[in-house]
Amino acid sequence: MFAQVLSAAPYGIEARLVEVQCDVGPGLPGFAIVGLPEKEVSEARERVRSAIRNIGLTFPQLRITANLAPADLKKEGAGFDLALAVALLVATGQVAAEKTRDAVFLGELALDGGLRPVRGALSMALAAREAGVGRAIVAVPSAGEAALVDELAVYPVASLSETVAFLRGEQVISATPRTVPEEEPGDWIDLALVRGQEHARRALEIAAAGAHHVVMVGPPGAGKSLLAKCLPGVLPPLAFDEALEVTRIHSVAGLLSPDRPLLRRRPFRSPHHTVSYAGMVGGGHGIPSPGEITLAHNGVLFLDELPEFDRKVLEALRQPLEDRRITVVRAGTAVTFPASFMLVGAMNPCPCGHLGDPLRPCRCRPHEVVGYRKRLSGPFLDRVDLFVQVPRLTREELLGEGGGEPSGAVRRRVAAAREAQQSRFTGPTRTNAEIGPREVRRTCRIGPEAKALLGRAVDHFALTGRGYVRTLKVALTIADLAGAATIGPEHLAEALQYRAFPEEVA
Ligand SMILES: Nc1ncnc2c1ncn2[C@@H]1O[C@H](COP(=O)(O)OP(=O)(O)O)[C@@H](O)[C@H]1O
Ligand SMILES: [Mg+2]
């Protein structure tokens, strides 16, 4: 007998439906699976055979052929197990075919018939709904995220035997309710704890308001890492569609926890400088999996000790810094992942860290300083929107009462500036950082005085085309923070301060 049930496979952060077909007939007993790589086949075969036997159902001594279609879709992992087992049970008359219609089956089998979570359940549920499928039978730990998709009834199942009982109408399982969890309080550091560094605080506020890429330069212990860790506390909460995107990414990467099916917090990723190329950009064995830049999508990618990162890894960021997505090619499969993150970099001005400090002489030789800076290429630096100097704290700042404005106040100003951006843009654009050169010309309204200043700045600072656009975008955010409809000279003048790598760091 022939049977067919639906499953799904992740593809990038999307998913495609997969038809799992099973044919059982006379002939030499055996179980062949077509459409999966060799290693996956033998493992899936064992799991399905054991699970069916262990729950007391019949695994027939017949010729069994299973096929996963479409054939050209690369598939891996164990997420098809449940569908394979159910298709086999239908083909052998142990479950009625009509009970499996209009349903997608997502779950990995253990040998005892228990069901494990699948990666990318949210994306697979979305693919099912898009295809007009009405029901999803999903392993319990993955049911919460799948249930975020409306117009799809998600039935959580703990085991193959429970699935069979449910399909036979012997056990009632109610659909998982769609619950959108409250936003969780973050564990960010409050800006009130940061002493001094007014200039850096301001630059970070601008960066947060426009989602601009920012690099902080200063001696060790000035508070660069501290300031970066304050950022999550001033960024606006994720909109629902942004939260869905972030959740899909983490689900595909296998980083979603069952008790938190929807991620509400903006990601803050801080990979160590020893991170590999694939770890940063995405890739790995088999079907490419998302890297740090994709896990930071809609949030912050914090690279501490920037020059210590592998040059190749940093150069690979050039495309996503501008295009806000990355295409990863692995074993003939090209997958595009979203990578719209805000880059926050921190670094010392030189290897010893004290270049420019009048009280602590720098111990580096000139060529060492040059070599250190050269680890960051011109094209990489040209994509940074703001450079900010973070000097050593003064005696007064260290000994004084300290404590600056708390994060809550900054967050409110950032939120207002983001709202101004939202109302300006149509389509998917959310922040000033995302607009391209053409849109910049269309979007930026510049007063005559500011225009004249900009003309002088182009000559004086020898601004590149990209530098010009960057400065305008930052000026636009500064105007948004000020609630101004046009870019004035004061906004532009401030933007110009952040335009270049600080040569002298005191
Ligand atoms: N501006 C500051 N305000 C308050 N504490 C600071 C400041 N700068 C440094 N510190 C203290 O020193 C520690 C080290 O600072 P850190 O942010 O790691 O410096 P950096 O990254 O610039 O080397 C912090 O954990 C914090 O306790
Ligand atoms: Mg640090």
Image (spheres, rainbow, N blue to C red):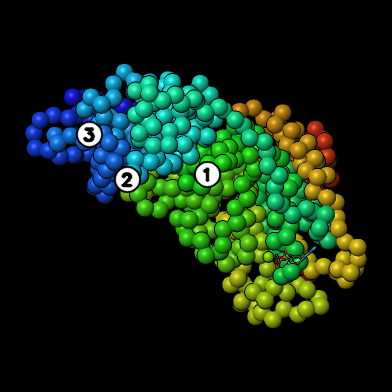
Labelled pair 1, 3 in contact (Cβ < 8 Å): no
Residue 468 in picture, x, y percent from top left: 68, 47
Q: Which residue is mark 3?
A: 58
Looking at the image, is mark 1 or mark 3 nearer the viewer? 3
Which amino acid type is marked by label 2? Answer: Leu
Looking at the image, is mark 3 or mark 2 nearer the viewer? 3
Residue 112 in picture, x, y percent from top left: 33, 44
Looking at the image, is mark 2 or mark 1 nearer the viewer? 2
Instruction: Name the quadrant where ligand 1 sits.
Output: bottom right
**What residue lies at 50% left-to-right and 25% top-to-bottom?**
175
Q: Residues within 10 Å of mark 2 (few under 14, many from 20)?
A: some
Q: Is residue 64 left or right of residue 337?
A: left
Q: Secondary structure at mark 3?
A: loop
Q: Which residue is mark 1?
A: 256
Q: Secondary structure at mark 1?
A: loop
- Whether residue 257 is visible, yes or no, is yes
**What residue lies at 59% left-to-right and 66% top-to-bottom?**
307
Image quadrant assignment for residue 398: bottom right
Mark 1 to mark 3 CA distance (whole Å)? 35 Å
Which amino acid type is marked by label 1? Answer: Leu
- Disc with the residue nearer the chain's start (3 vs 2): 3
Residue 180 in picture, x, y percent from top left: 61, 32
Mark 3 to mark 2 CA distance (whole Å)? 15 Å
Report the disc number at residue 184: none
Q: Which residue is mark 2?
A: 111
Image quadrant assignment for residue 419: top right
Residue 434 in picture, x, y percent from top left: 62, 40
